[in-house]
Image (cartoon, grey):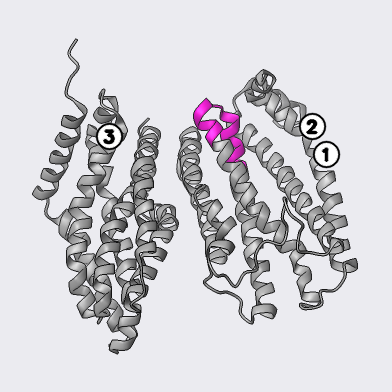
Amino acid sequence: MWKWLHSYADPERAYKLAGTLLPWFSALAIGFIGVGSIWGLLFAPVDYQQGDSYRIIFIHVPAASMSMSAYMAMATSAFIGLVWQIKSADWAAAAIAPIGAVVTFIALITGATWGKPMWGTWWVWDARLTSELVLLFLYLGVISLYASFEDKVLAARAAGILAIVGVINIPIIKYSVEWWNSLHQPATIKITEKSSMAMEMLMPLLINILGFGLMIGAITLVRFRAEILARNGMRPWVRELATAEGVK
Amino acid sequence: MNKGISFTQAFFTLLKRDLQIAIRHKGDIFNPLLFFILVVTLFPLGIGPEPQVLSRVAPGIIWVAALLASMLSLERLFKADFVDGSLEQMLLSPQPLSLMVLAKVLAHWILTGVPLILVAPLLAVLLHLDDNSYGALMATLALGTPVLSLLGAIGVALTVGLRKGGVLLSLLILPLYIPVLIFATSAIDAAGLNLPYSGHLAIIGAMLVGSLILAPFAIGASLRVSTN
């Protein structure tokens, strides 16, 4: 059933597939983020409690939820790479790590700028905020572990193990607002029940979340392609590609 | 066919070997302990000697110092064996690697964790810790320091092959130590206020059981990555 998937373990086919998918992901990401942000920032109704400053939600929530999704994607690829020894999966994990770190950083910064007008402080040592900060440290740990090995095959495996160990943090972030009394508000978007948010605000938010996911996908594809080329520099197909592009 | 020694025998042989080696190099036991005491001594000098202030921050200081001491002492967990090649022999031996790794981590905890627990009440006196909190301090250290050794060993196993692993090691394992720190210090604080703290202890206990089961596999996998 999954046999068709196996052929993409081959770097050349993975590179070409990433190349075909890249324009789709990029165009859709630009479209979704454009629509979601303009709708959210200009046309969505004003919040009766928070005024206009709530509008940072349209950046903050997508960044925060995608920071966790990106981590899960990285850990899943790392797991596939470790268990089935598929190098393309290792490269995908290595490609996601810096993007996830940046998205986590965006979530923390936008959260701080939102916290200043609402809570009167940039930062509180609260379960949700602390666990998100730990997520940033985990990303940085994975990146620096990957960077510190000369042999990139070993580097990917070592960083993969660390990424899998760090998965323990993801449910802690997700449920921190329910397990602890937190200054951070509980989740407003619920899949199973009705969301505690007006439809006119929810729609642009969901569009932006999807857009952020697509954007992470697009940047990952770019980095994934670069990673494949860097690790396969000696292969004939890469050399042909380089000659075709006019590289001497 | 000769099956070699049993799992229990292998476990205790390795445990005994590690303890013996450490006892012959006494600095390995005493240096982390001295570091622990010195770090705790720095705080009263840095934030002032008022007993109220010190007793408020004592749980945090003792635990942070314990985290740092545990991390520093972990560096030598696999290093010597890696350098002289005995680690590779362990990887090649027919006994399961996770068992051997568990023996090494246990030896390490006996050598660095237990002395740290024993000296902690003395430092708590110096920091004017609440009288009610001593039980909680000892209980959290007894349950928490093995978790530190187990989680830290994953980081050490990942970096053992690197020449400059020291700073990287702290980046890898300190984030993983944070949950232990949070629950341990909040247990000690609760005990100081005469509140029940068994819930916090139960969570640290759960972390211990979880890491005892899962960490040896992660350490084993990391060692295999680091040595080839």
Residue at 40% in and 34% down: B225
**Residue B125 in sight here:** yes
Q: Front-most of B83 and B124?
A: B124
Residue A20 badge: 2
Q: Is residue B68 left or right of residue A136?
A: left
Q: Circle 1 is placed at which residue position? A: A24
Query: Tag 1's secondary structure?
Result: helix
Q: Amino acid at mark 3?
A: Leu
Residue at 25% in and 82% down: B128
Give the quarter of the image for residue A25: top right
**Residue B163 in sight here:** no
Residue farthest toward the left in the current orientation of the protein: B24
Q: Circle 3 is placed at which residue position? A: B99
Quarter of the picture containing the C terminus of chain B is top left
For disc 3, the neighbor class at 10 Å (few under 14, some 14 to 19, many from 20) is some
Distance Cα–Cα, label 3 vs label 1? 49 Å
Find the magenta span and give its range. A79-95
x then y, percent, for residue B184 = 36, 65
Q: Is residue A232 left or right of residue A193?
A: left
